[in-house]
Amino acid sequence: MKNLSLKQKLTILYTVLMTVNICAVLAVLFSLSNREILSSVQNRLRESVTGAFDDIDWEDGRLDFDSDILELENGVYLSVYDMDGALLYGKIPYGFDQSMDFRDGQVRRQKAGSVEYYVLDMSYAPEENVNLMVRGIISITDAEESFRITLRLALICLPLLVVLTAVLGYFMTRRTLRPVAHITETVRAIREEEDLSRRIGLGEGRDEIYRLASTFDSLLGQIEDSMKREKQFTSDVSHELRTPLSVILMQCDALLARDGLSGEVREEITVIQRKADSLSRMISQLLLLSRADQGREKVTMEILDFTGLSQMAAAEMEGIAAAKGIRLETAISPDIMVRGDETLLIRLWLNLLQNAVTYGKEGGCIHMGLWEDEDTVTGYVEDDGIGISARDLPHIWERFYRADSSRSNNGSSQNNNDSSQDNNSSSGLGLSMVQWIISVHKGTIQAVSEPGRGSRFTFRIPKEKKS
């Protein structure tokens, strides 16, 4: 039952209940009908036997019988006997046992071959000293046969009625649950498209489903307003922080340019400069993502030499990797063209490569590759560093998500993000930006990792057809 839809469950329930009700009603009706038929047969038998008295006359010392006694009126066989049991007049069914004794006023059952009869004997005295016995015989089997025909017809019609009930129940249920399907599809579309401006919009209605849809729309409106305020706040804060950070960096540069600074002071200023620079880059990324969320980030799509851009990014990161004793090996196919934003695609490579350098193993190796097939351009960055745990892997694309620092310190897990940071800090935005860049270019990206053995990030974007 768990794998059945609600429509199917309701249809089955409705059909079962209707079938049980129909069967119960038919059982009661047929039970009552059977008793009613037998009672009706007995009444007809009594009426025929008593009516036969009018067809018996005593004239001039002899009995005179009307021919109506011989007619099977209402299916009743009538016969007249004297008190010694001798048949005087009438008709009896073929094969009926004539030696059956007489019992005045009692309705009895008697079977003759495969046929069962009701038998009624009633005494009648046309004259004071003349006593007769009138016997009526009627077939129970014939009466029950018509009942059985009706019963068989009902049993034949019952499956058809069950099927008709199931079909009508299914269509009624589907029609009733159509708004639920609309709610489900709309909510799924909102989730997939991340478009909180959409509404279910079932319209006016008084039932529970319409009230549920109205509640969903109200909730979506509140969530949309909250998200807008959050995005605007993030954008405003990021923008406001850029100026003081620029001033801090300028002051650090000015101080470091002075002569006569002691080594300890110069080192402290350098730390401040490095941290401020890292913070400045993080704010730049946060501002870019905030504008992207609001649809205000301008993306310029043009035909680009992706091979050249990839080689430029590799050359820029090669020195940074070498400073950590990491070797960068590339396998970039020539003449690969894509339609994309040049700045974003360079940032894509830099983020992935910086992530690999940050969490790569000192003295290890980073592999970078790019190739194309018929419809797709595929790129990857693979390191042999600390890796990402299975628990953290699904969350690495979330902004500011960080793996447990204790595991990061002992090398069993990898921090989620970063590209534009020094080796001692992480903004938690790098991979979020990578995912956004890939989505802008209508591509896909996936990560495969094993703690202690490194990670591999593979992206695919559509290939630009060569003319």
Image: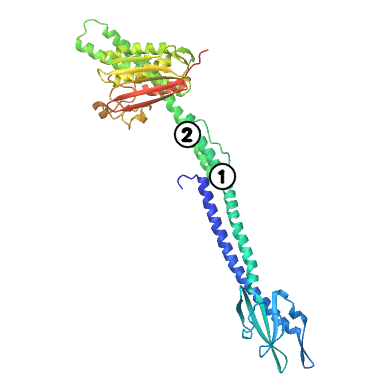
Q: In the image, which is nearer the foreground, mark 1 or mark 2?
A: 1
Quick one: SS at disc 2?
helix
Task: Tell me the crowding category of disc 2: few under 14, some 14 to 19, or many 20 or more residues within 10 angstroms, Cα based.
Answer: few
Q: How far across and down, in percent of the image, does residue 286 sit?
A: 39, 21
Q: Residue at x 58, y 49 (%)?
A: 167
* The label number, if any, that marks residue 174 in the structure image: 1
State the residue position of label 2: 222
User: In this rendering, is residue 296 above or below 67?
Assistant: above
Q: Is residue 253 above or below residue 373?
A: above
Q: Tell me the kind of residue under disc 2.
A: Gln
Instruction: Give the residue displayed 63% in from the left and 67% down from the top.
Output: 147
Q: Residue furthest top?
A: 259
Q: Nearer the viewer, residue 348 or 84?
A: 84
Q: Is residue 451 left or right of residue 439?
A: left
Instruction: List x then y, in percent, for residue 134.
Output: 69, 84
Q: From the viewer's perspective, tell me whether residue 284 is left or right of residue 73.
A: left
Q: Tell me if label 1 and label 2 are in contact, CB under 8 Å.
A: no
Residue 130 position (above or below residue 458): below
The one of 456 and 157 positioned closer to us in this rendering: 157
Q: Which corner quadrant of the image does residue 453 belong to?
A: top left
Q: Secondary structure at mark 1?
A: helix
Name the residue rendered at 50%, 32% in the picture.
Answer: 189
Residue 347, which numbered label? none
Three-letter amino acid code of the residue under disc 1: Arg
